Amino acid sequence: MTMIEKFSQLNKENKAILATNFYNFETLKGVLLAAKQTKSSIILQLTQSSIDYMGLEIAVNMARTALKYYQVEGWLHLDHGASVQLAKRCLDAGFDSVMYDGSELPLSENIKNTRQVVEYAEHYNANVEAELGYIPKLGQNTNKKGYTEVNDAIKFVKETGINSLAVAIGTVHGFYKGTPKLNFERLKEIKKAVKIPLVLHGGSGIPDADLKMAVANGINKINVATEIKNIFTKTIKQELNKSDEIDLRKTFPPSIDAITNLISKKILTINN
């Protein structure tokens, strides 16, 4: 099943899939063990920085091999691709889905660039995600509001031909300073207007009840990244403080287990 087909199924059934970033073998293993234990599909995501860190070919091969080894149905997705060229490079490398993020550009330029990615992706029958509105990235102003405008979404979807759209309804990337307040009314309006699969970025730290509400009102993909990095690093620190053990084969497994528990809970939350 292609990513486009999976999204179509989720959209029709009003369900969502979890999309998790991975940064090394340990984070990848933790995520896939969670998917296997819950008998769920998963989307594995790579950002530009993760690709630079691991190397594109190594990261792709590692993801593909791990999916096969753990017998998990999954897809590989470029998260927040900042350029058309990066999106094309990832598609050539075998990604099932790419995101071109031109959300900080003027709408006309975002449309133009996204359309280029869509046209290129058609050769691979790959999914293309884009973003509209203001979803603060790490270091950006989290107090600024910039919800996705319904009319902009209609125009954008029509003129680009994208398969899925990341919407700004009050989430942020990274940790929340307080309890996030999501604009579910705007979400419902966008879903009714564009009808394509919608994506929720900034899934780390959102209360379970809000995640369920987001799915009920049209979200088909929920991204989680920050919580994975956080629990992995914190658990390693705790393990290192317990003893003078230097064997990473002994100090890393608790962090893998912590990620598996975290992602299992997330999957069960959005599926129940």
Image: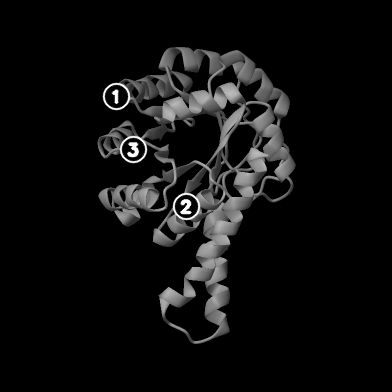
How far apart marks 3 and 1 lie (CA) works out to 12 Å
Give the SS element for disc 3.
loop
Give the distance between the C-alpha atoms of the residues marked 1 and 2, in whole angstroms.
Answer: 29 Å
| Quarter of the figure with residue 90 | top left
Classify mark 1: helix, strand or loop.
helix
Q: Quarter holding the C terminus?
A: top right
> Looking at numbered disc 2 in the image, what kind of residue is underneath it?
Leu
Residue 199 shows up from this direction? yes
Q: Nearer the viewer, mark 3 or mark 1?
A: 3
Can the viewer see residue 230 in this picture? no
The quarter of the image holding the N terminus is top left
Q: Which residue is mark 3?
A: 95
Task: Give the percent coordinates (x, y) of residue 105.
Answer: 45, 28
Q: Are marks 3 and 1 in contact (CB under 8 Å)?
A: no
Q: Residue at x 64, y 45 (%)?
A: 268
Q: Label 2, on which residue?
A: 32
- Left or right of 88? Residue 70 is right
Please report whichever mark, 3 or 2, sits nearer to the chain's N-terminal start. Answer: 2
Query: Taking 248 as reference, is 59 left or right?
Result: left
Binning the other alpha carbons within 10 Å of mark 2 as few (below 14), some (14 to 19) or many (20 upward) gives: many
* Observer-nearest of 205 and 104: 205
The amino acid type of the residue labelled 1 equals: Tyr
Residue 247 tag number: none
Q: Position of residue 167 (x, y in %)?
A: 57, 29
Q: Which residue is drawn at the image coordinates 66% and 44% (left, top)?
A: 269
> Which residue position holds label 1?
120
Judge depth for marks 3 and 2 and give the one in front: 2
In the depicted structure, whether residue 98 falls above or below residue 53: above
Q: Are marks 1 and 2 in contact (CB under 8 Å)?
A: no
